[in-house]
Amino acid sequence: MTGNEAGEEARVETRDDSGDGSWRAVGSVAGWQTAASLCYYAIFAATGFVRDAFSVSESLVGLFLTAGLLGYTVFLFPSGAAVDGYGEKPVMVVGLLALSVALVGVTFAPPSYLLLLVTVALLGAAYSTAMPASNRGIVAAAPAGSKNLAMGLKQVGVTVGSGASSLVVTGVAVVAAWQVGFWAIAVFAAGYALVFATRYRGNLGTGRLERPRLAGLGGNRAYVALVAAGLFIGASIFSMLGYTVLYVQDVVGTGPALAGGVLAATQVTGSVGRIGAGSLADRLGGPRGAATVALVQLAGAVALFSLLVGTGGSFALTIAVFVTLGLTIHGSTGVFYSCLSGVVDDGDIGAATAGGQTALNVGGLVAPPLFGFVVESTGYGAGWALVAGSTVLATVLLFVVRRRI
């Protein structure tokens, strides 16, 4: 081996807090994911305040959310390349600080709606660091035989951050301006970024910034099928997220508080599902185990979405269906990422994750407006049939993935 080769090998060697995998490092990454999700999902909790502050229609509020998701999607591959080149730690520290700054920027946008769109797009761009960086950190830090569980725990940070941001933003707004909630979250995230920078060791990259090796990933049939499945998983998840509250209000006939409680319950069971799915996948072993668990979860989601195709049921039945959907469709993302990281080389995890998350986001950009159009034209039954069909396609593709591993 030449000196240059030895140096290159040293640069790509990974390291974590213990050398053989550390739950402390897993906890640090999961905490970072929670802080990042607190920042990004605050915009979803503030839609009512944004509508009033800018005097805009519901459709323009939707455009506000789309701008954030678009910024998130566009910057995924650059973020993935940075993670593969320089390691996840610097990307995570800079990303969380950028989220803090952008979140504060949103509060200073009024009364300019155009400035609001720009700042929320920058918020989404900063959040694009989340999945490529945190997934790479989990793969390296997870103790032997526990990668799927560790990934599930990290993914719980998304649901915890989302739920907590809703409580903070709406709770603070009761006693102060909604902007104060944003500032509180930004201060917390910036503080965590500084602590994270001193306590988390991280893993080295190649030492250079390169274009993602998409040609190599494109030749990986299992990865391509998994990304295609991600497109339909994202379509189903974002459609459900966007219309659960309206469905419960319009069809079951509850008030907004109870409808919001149903949505919150899906986030709680989604967290439980991610941890349980990860633990089971570890027992089955490897990416094939993760694909098997995800396949079962998606098949269960198909059956549950099909129950919603008929006319609305009782409140108790609706709660049961949506809570179980949390365990299945929402609980599948942890093992989805575990499987994805298992079918590619460690040096490609950043780019591979960017590809998978891009597929999920594209599904989220396209499906909810289509769902809304179908509901307006035909009714909720046809809308849920569309979601069930999307989940069927995801299930078929997961079956293909499992066969190719």
Image (cartoon, rainbow, N blue to C red):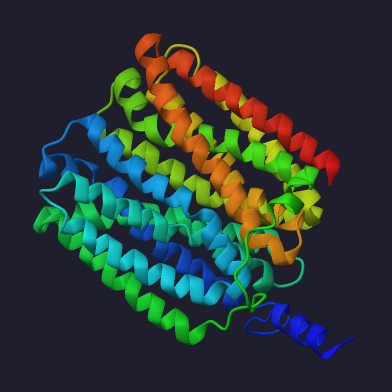
Residue appearing at x 46%, y 31% in the figure:
366
Horizontally, residue 8 falls left or right of residue 149, namely right
Looking at the image, residue 229 lies above or below residue 165: above
Q: Nearer the viewer, residue 67 or 400?
A: 67
Looking at the image, residue 110 lies above or below residue 296: below
Residue 364 visible (yes or no) = yes
Q: Nearer the viewer, residue 29 or 119?
A: 119
Residue 287 position within the rendered picture, expressed as x and y whole percent measured from the top left: 77, 53
Residue appearing at x 46%, y 25% in the figure:
317
Residue appearing at x 43%, y 23% in the figure:
371
Residue 166 visible (yes or no) = no
Residue 195 position within the rendered picture, expressed as x and y whole percent measured from the top left: 41, 82
Which residue appears farthest toward the top when viewing the image? Answer: 378
Which residue appears farthest toward the bottom when viewing the image? Answer: 3
Horizontally, residue 282 falls left or right of residue 356, namely right
Residue 35 position within the rendered picture, expressed as x and y whole percent measured from the top left: 40, 65
Horizontally, residue 41 falls left or right of residue 4, namely left
Residue 293 position within the rendered picture, expressed as x and y whole percent measured from the top left: 71, 44
Looking at the image, residue 378 lies above or below residue 307: above
Which residue appears farthest toward the right when viewing the image? Answer: 1
Looking at the image, residue 143 lies above or below residue 356: below
Query: Image quadrant of residue 155?
Result: bottom right
Query: Image quadrant of residue 296?
Result: top right
Q: Quadrant of the N terminus?
A: bottom right
Q: Nearer the viewer, residue 234 or 278?
A: 234
Horizontally, residue 388 falls left or right of residue 251, namely right
Query: Image quadrant of residue 147?
Result: bottom right
Total numbered labels placed on residues in the image: 0
Residue appearing at x 67%, y 85% in the figure:
18
